[in-house]
């Protein structure tokens, strides 16, 4: 698969942003009865600064009659910043939507940390506390608009002493060839504070979207030259193979710029290797109404598939430059 050749010019209306908010991530589904598209995304106040996604983020959704948009914000799914110190009390981030049967499953990163003034960015110690408490959760609903029921504990927790012993985040799921659920995720090992150890990607399997998920014991994608290997995976099954898009922190796999996105593939969902055409895309947006734009960050890839099961839209989060407001775009895809 040559993913880069699939990228098509991006219409101006395929950009989703909110005044006063940073918008990040982006995972989309279609309700067949309504014919409407639901975009789940992360957001947090622009006034708190871009890095406050760790401490301020919540998941919201927007709707459209077209997969490319324009999308209109509807509501936030809500987090509870009071009450018991439950694992996802304060923050929800990294939405990834899966329709399975007649129900919808929303996977996300949740976390909690010490109280602080939400009108201000958190101090460094508080920021790292929130980051290191990140775990993967799931919520379930009968309709994309909810109501959503969140699990009371993480669907994928850490494994102390293992490669993901400090935190888990960036969930992505797909149905396997034999009907199970494959999850790929980001894990961070225990290590010197505050950052911890190596950042890698791994996989886990379950017979049902709500789990339990059984982890593979070792990470599936690592960088032998740098502990910070990959993040933001997106996994899918197509034909007789599995594919995954991942942010290449160092440009090691793509042999391109830092933060470009690499394409990996696997025959069984367990053993992964870089694809022949490993560079999926770099930090360039091919707008249809203006020249191609270089941006600081183009990540959190997610796909939407048409009725034939082919990738039709690539969703990405964009930060154009330091200090700008982030947003989501949908990039049309051509033939596979």
Image: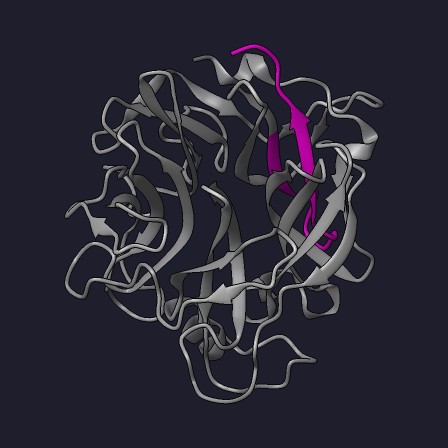
Relative to 134, say whether 2 is above or below: above
Asked whether 10 falls inside the magenta stretch, the response is no
User: Is residue 270 rendered to the left or right of residue 302?
Assistant: left
Residue 73 lies in quadrant: bottom right
Whether residue 54 can be seen here = no
Image quarter in which the N terminus is found: top left
Visible residue check, residue 69: yes
- Residue 221, image x, y percentages: 27, 37
For residue 332: magenta? yes
Across and down, in percent, residue 326 comes to 70, 50
**Left-right relation of 272 to 280:** left
Work out whether 42 lies above or below 305. below
Front position in the image: 163 or 154: 154
Name the residue at 34% across, 60% down: 155
The colour scheme used here is: one colour
The answer to which image quadrant residue 263 occupies is: top left
Magenta highlight range: 314-336
Give above or below for 319 relative to 333.
below
Identify which residue is drawn at 68% across, 33% down. 330
Percent x, y of residue 102: 50, 44
Task: From the top left corner, tell me how far across and down residue 153 is, in percent.
Answer: 35, 70
Q: Is residue 63 above or below residue 128?
A: above
In front of the other: 246 or 304: 304
Residue at 18% over, 66% down: 160
Q: Could you tell whether 305 is left or right of 323 in the image?
A: left
């Amino acid at each position: 698969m040559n993913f880069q050749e699939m990228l098509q010019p991006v219409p101006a209306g395929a950009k989703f942003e909110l005044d006063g908010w940073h918008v990040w991530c982006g995972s989309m589904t279609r309700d067949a009865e309504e014919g409407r598209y639901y975009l789940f995304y992360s957001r947090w106040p622009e006034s708190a600064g871009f890095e406050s996604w760790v401490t301020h983020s919540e998941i919201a959704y927007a709707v459209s009659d077209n997969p490319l948009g324009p999308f209109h914000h509807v509501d936030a799914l809500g987090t509870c910043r009071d009450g018991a110190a439950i694992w996802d009390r304060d923050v929800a981030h990294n939405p990834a939507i899966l329709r399975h049967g007649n129900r919808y499953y929303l996977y996300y990163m949740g976390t909690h940390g010490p109280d602080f003034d939400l009108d201000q960015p958190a101090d460094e110690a508080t920021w790292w506390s929130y980051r290191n408490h990140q775990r993967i959760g799931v919520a379930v609903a009968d309709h994309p608009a909810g109501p959503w029921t969140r699990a009371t504990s993480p669907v994928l927790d850490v494994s102390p002493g293992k490669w993901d012993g400090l935190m888990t985040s960036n969930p992505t799921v797909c149905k396997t060839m034999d009907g199970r659920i494959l999850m790929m995720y980001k894990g961070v090992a225990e290590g010197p504070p505050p950052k911890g150890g190596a950042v890698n990607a791994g996989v886990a399997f379950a017979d049902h979207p709500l789990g339990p998920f059984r982890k593979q014991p070792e990470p599936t994608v690592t960088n032998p030259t740098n502990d910070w290997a990959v993040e933001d995976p997106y996994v899918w099954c197509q034909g007789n193979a599995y594919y995954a898009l991942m942010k290449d922190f160092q440009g090691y796999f793509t042999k391109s710029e830092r933060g470009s996105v690499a394409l990996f593939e696997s025959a069984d969902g367990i053993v992964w290797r870089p694809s022949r055409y490993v560079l999926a895309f770099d930090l360039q947006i091919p707008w249809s109404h203006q020249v191609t734009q270089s941006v600081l960050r183009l990540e959190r890839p997610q796909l939407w598939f048409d009725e034939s099961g082919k990738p039709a839209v690539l969703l990405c989060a964009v930060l154009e430059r330091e200090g700008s407001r982030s947003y989501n775009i949908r990039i049309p895809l051509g033939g596979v």
